[in-house]
Amino acid sequence: MAQPPTHHRRDTISALTLLAPAMILFGAFILLPLMQTFAWSLYRYEVFGGVKEFVGLDNFAKLAGDEVFGIALINNLKFAVLSVVLQVGMGLVLAALLDRGVRRFKVVYRTIIFAPILVSTAAVGLLWSLILNPSIGPVDDWLGLIGLSAPRNGLLGEPAFAIYGVIFVGAWQYTGFMMVILLAGMQNVPEETYEAARMDGCKGLRAFFHITLPTIRNVIITCCLLTVIGAFKVFDLVYVLTNGGPGNATEVLASYIFRNAFEFGQIGYANALSVVFLAIAFVFGLIQFRMIRR
Amino acid sequence: MKSLAFFPRTRRMAIIMHLFLLGYVAVILFPLSWVVIGALKTNREMFLDPTGLPADPNWGKFIEAWNAGVRDFFINSVVVSGVSVALIVIASALAAYALTRMNFRYSGWVYLLTVLCFAIPVHAVLVPIYGLLSDLHLLNTHLGLILPYAAFGLPFSIILMYSFFYEFPAELEEAGKLDGCGPWRRLWFVVLPLSRPVLISVAIFNLVGVWNEFLLATIIMTSKHMQTLPLGLVSFRDQYGTDWPGTLAAISIGSLPLLVLFVIFQKYFVRSMAGMGK
């Protein structure tokens, strides 16, 4: 039945009213700023000295030859790959143990393993920076016990090691989160699937590899995506643990954008970095959306 | 009872599995307890024996840290998180309802726009947001943090609510329609009360995200008395750096609020965070 036109117009007005708060916030804080990011990325725009001139793609050309940008990008990639291995890998092991492994204390284990996600990343960074601090933290003493001597400035002061320390702390915080998502996926695998597999003689760890993993494939992919996106967005951990140092050894894209904009006052260059960042994050974001709406 | 186990159901296997899990739990609990115990020690004890217990536990450090700034950070966090989560839940429910229920020609475009915003990280617009808030004189104000938090929390929340409302049985609303309820009343009296699970989920994961947010807060809240907990704790370290027990006390009590909420509402927290995997 066709609706009378007045009804349709009333619906449109109601819809616009209901959508207004969200649309205004999107416009003011996401879409318009995004336009500005694109525009300013084409300017040589420096806070100190008050320079602001159109330079076309110069910032992007500069970026291609920027060594620190390269370091940051590689650190983000290391972060992404190692975090997937550590967080999703360990998350799977823990989830399997809690789903069809141990029979007692499951809730206690889950609660404790999940807890770090509720401590702010900044606080987690602070606490690990103190534990790894050579003068008051215990880790240096432990290294001594197994016959290793810690670097003079602590593990995080060692350029070759620092980024792995940061990645480890990230895994310490987020593995429990991955475990909870994967566990929920495993608990959704129907009992009949396992029954049928057992009839065919597939049980134990073989069932895990041949039944569980393929069935929760999409959950695993989502976990990997969340981890990779998180790895590219990482900022607070680096800022608190190493502040990008020693030297530029632990610089990541987010900290480099931040530094250029708010320490060096290189607005144009910071926005060019933001455009690159957006290009990377946008692709992963759209894939993630496809997974949610599957 | 689950009929199939991944590992043999022997006593030895059970012990191995529990030992593995206990080892992992120790890796989680050690740093957390080290912080709390460290807060009770003296500076001297920290240096001499980093893992030792305090000879004479000094509980006063917690109160000192609370009064030296943590209270202000806590209040700022409560105001900013409370208002932005409320704003996100309300605005996303309204938007998702409009998109799924109203005969509105541009619904498809609005949804597409939402997805677009979902894929845009805050990192990409840091500088313009700073400029905008500076022009609006909203730097170092609660509202200056609440508005961008709401904007960036909305897309995912709308997408989640959209899927929920999409599957919401239309018959329930038809009854309201026959009784002469307009769309607003149907939303308020029929749809929202029955949507509690998704509203709670949206509220919780936004709360966790906003409560712990750092990057935006760092650029917007530059004056110390406006800082939220995460950056307040960092500036606490920078200010009282040599008073290790004080810093550890600040980290302990600053991290407590969300952990307490988690213990009380554990079921909802786990369900909400696990829902991210959908």
Image: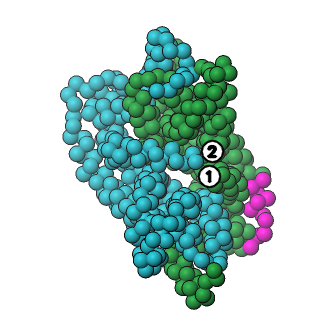
Q: Chain of mark 1?
A: A
Above or below for B96 versus B267: below
Q: Is residue A289 magenta?
A: no
What range is drawn magenta here?
A54-64
Residue A164 lies, with reference to residue B191, above or below; the image says above
Q: CA distance from mark 2 to mark 1?
A: 8 Å
Name the residue at 61% across, 83% down. A3
Mark whose residue sits in front, 2 or 1:
1
Q: Who's the residue at 44% across and 54% down the image? A: B197
Q: Is residue A108 left or right of residue A44?
A: left
Q: Residues within 10 Å of mark 1 (few under 14, many from 20)?
A: some
The answer to whether one can see residue B118 in this image is yes
Q: Is residue A62 magenta?
A: yes
Chain of the residue under label 2 = A
Q: Among the chains, which one is cyan?
A: B
Residue A230: percent from left, percent from top: 59, 47
Mark 2 neighbour class, 10 Å CA radius: few under 14, some 14 to 19, many 20 or more = many
| Residue B31 - label | none
Amino acid of disc 1: Ile
Q: Which mark is residue A292?
A: 1
SS assignment at label 1: helix
Q: Residue furthest bottom?
A: A6
Q: Quadrant of residue B90?
A: bottom left
**From the viewer's perspective, is B19 left or right of A89?**
left
Question: In the shown orientation, is residue B93 left or right of residue A46?
Answer: left
Residue shown at 58% from the left, 36% from the top: A189
Q: Mark 2 near mark 1, Cβ–Cβ under 8 Å?
A: yes
Whether residue A150 is visible, yes or no, is no
Kindly identify which residue carries mark 2.
A222
Secondary element under disc 2, as helix, strand or loop, is helix
